Image: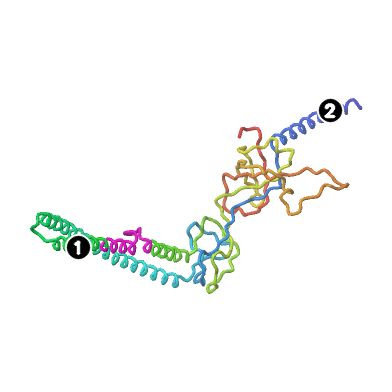
Amino acid sequence: MNLRRILILLPLLLIGGAAAAYVDHYQHLHPSTSDAYLGMHVVDISAQVSGPVALVAVLSHQAVKRGDTLFRIDPKPFALALQKADADLQQARQAQRATQAQVVTAQAQVDAAQASLREARRHTARVMKLVQKGTASKDDGDAARKALKEAQDALAVAQAQKAAAIARRGADGDDNAAIKLAMAVRDQAQLDLQHTRVLAPADGIVGEVDLRAGSFVTAGQGLFALVETGDVWVDANFKETDLVRIHPGLPAQVTVDMAPGKTFNGRVVSLSPASGTAFSLFPPENATGNWVKVTQRFPVRVHILDPAPGLRLGASSEVTINTTQSP
């Protein structure tokens, strides 16, 4: 009877042992963890200019597309600032044209002074020859040299006036400093006017929106969050004993509790350089007499290749990595 029982139980024990060995081997090659959570990019929405809110175009938890209007700041003050900047730029161009006309006038005076100087030099040369021959008096020679000196001084004055006109004008055209400054102020005013309309930076879902029309917002003030839905990953905490077989590029299977019956394809992106407790605010103190060794867990990021609509940030997940394939 005992032999008969042994003959019956032995195959069962062998089958059970083989199954257990297979499961253990499979788990060794396919490490898995349910300590995993969905991750998504979160953008803090804020205004780039300060002012009263004129329109709020979204509600809490509303799905938006990239470029959709989230809210609008009253554009009237910024439109007036742009008009003033345009007028200042026009005045700067007019002033530049006026100083350019002064440069042209100064150049004409230089040309006239140079012509007078050339004529004075020729006249002086003729008179000095006549003085040497005795057909002209020394007074005539002195008068000619005086006229030459006056022509030279007149040219120097004209050149100085031209240099002063060029200095007042500065660089020509749009390279002029005053025009550059006016253009920069105009461009900034135009940019500020554009920033009164705050747009969604990416496809996603907005968080809690408490903003209301009439509220005054300050530039850089965080108003609400936008959770991007285009890029989804899982931060899975694997045991340190599993990390030796996990490498970036390995394929993975991801299941999410909020999407039962569906399996997502993933790929390992990166492994954390430290355990989760190492980044905590108060790391555990192990220098005590009652220390107990605990297997540490390390975050592994797995990018989901085929995310589905409806996934939410922080959802519980389970990740299984196939270490039998090459990264």
Start and end of the magenta stretch? Answer: 157-179
Amino acid at pointer 1: Lys
Comparing 220 with 137, the one in front is 137
> Which residue is outermost to the right?
1
Residue with the mark numbered 1: 146
Give the distance between the C-alpha atoms of the residues marked 2 and 1, in whole angstroms: 137 Å
Quarter of the image for residue 148 reads bottom left
> Which residue is outermost to the bottom?
214
State whether residue 160 is above or below residue 77: above
Q: Residue at x 27, y 63 (%)?
A: 157
Amino acid at pointer 2: Leu
Comparing 235 with 276, the one in front is 276
Label 2 or label 1, whichever comes before in sequence order: 2
Q: Position of residue 79 (x, y in %)?
A: 42, 70
Comparing 35 with 118, the one in front is 118
Residue with the mark numbered 2: 10
Q: Position of residue 96 (x, y in %)?
A: 31, 65
